[in-house]
Image (cartoon, grey):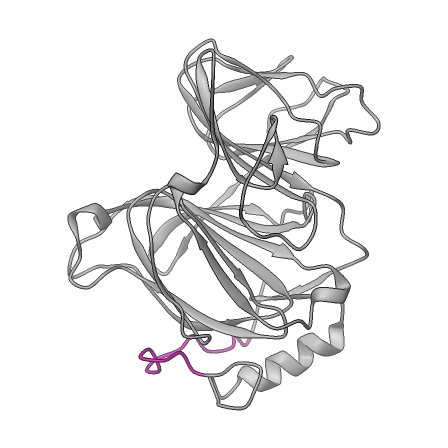
Amino acid sequence: MPQSNSSALERVIVAKSQQVAGFPVRRVLPSRQRRRVGPWTFIDHMGPARLTPDRPMRVPPHPHLNLATVTYLFEGELVHRDSLGSCQSIQPGAINWMHAGRGVVHSETSPVPLTPAAEHLHGLQLWLALPREREESDPWFQHTPAVALPLLAFVGGEARVLIGEALGTKSPARVESPTLLIDVSLSAGARLDLPSSALELAAYVVSGRVAFEGTEAEPGHLLVFGSASAVLGRGELRALEESRVVLLGGAPLDGERFMFWNFVSSSRERLEEAKATWKQGPQPGTRFPPIPFDSGDFVPLPKNLA
């Protein structure tokens, strides 16, 4: 693992490669080195993967509790459905935020029939823990198309502010606590001053190769920076070749969070309740009702988790 020699750089996390639903995924968070950055508690880097009509993407109905999910695509197309009745095509550059609150069920699948745009899948799946007072709130879903998100050009690159406020602009995406997510493209040699608007900040390398002072990072590396309150400015990220980086962070959580499978909560008892509720799958009148027009198979509660 690359080592940090900068006082402004806390650590470098290397994502673990695995298979999810038969497709290549890099698991970035949670890590033994760091459980979260700001409210972000889970990050999967999906693909790049080639899909075919006989091998599309299908993640059947599954539950979430006391968190919010974000799907962000670099390439491809997915269809989001949830127990609120939402049915939304997810395309590159858009933000799809699902606030699970007290409980929601959703699925994500390739469009049927498989469109040419959906044949190559590449993107991020992220979860955020909710503030304690919002954990048991009503669920909701918001889609923000790419054209509605601010895009900033600078020498050698551009940055799209997906969630939160930074670089002199603000995303219209709704948030429940101070949260930041920025998609940055850099040409070789370009430099980016890291924003100080987030108390906690990290940079995930999607492609290319970048450097922060004496530390280099490649795809699958998460650079976790020191607190903005402890460091006067965070310095700059430099692209050693054409690169794509996602900046993420926000305010620290208001206390410990516990995670089991798709559930993240401040209450262990609530996790146990959710596990018991999901054993029978989606059921009307529970935390996890069925998804309209997607009520067939579902992801069962795992018996054992490593």
Residue at horizontal 80%, vertical 22%? 231
Residue at horizontal 21%, vertical 46%? 117
Main secondary structure along the magenta-highlighted residues? loop
| Quadrant assignment for the C terminus | bottom right
Residue at horizontal 53%, vertical 67%? 140
Q: Is residue 298 magenta?
A: yes
124, above or below 276, in the image: above
Q: Dividing the picture into quarters, in which one does residue 151 lie?
A: top left
Pick out the residue farthest to the top: 189
The region drawn magenta spans 290-303
**Left or right of 157, for residue 204:** right
Question: Taking the image as drawn, is residue 46 in sight?
Answer: no
Q: Is residue 212 magenta?
A: no
Where is residue 208 shown, x and y percent of the image? Answer: 42, 23
Q: Report the front residue among 212 and 116.
A: 116
232, above or below 222, in the image: above
**Left or right of 260, for residue 173:** left
Where is residue 79 shown, x and y percent of the image? Answer: 32, 61
248, above or below 20, in the image: above
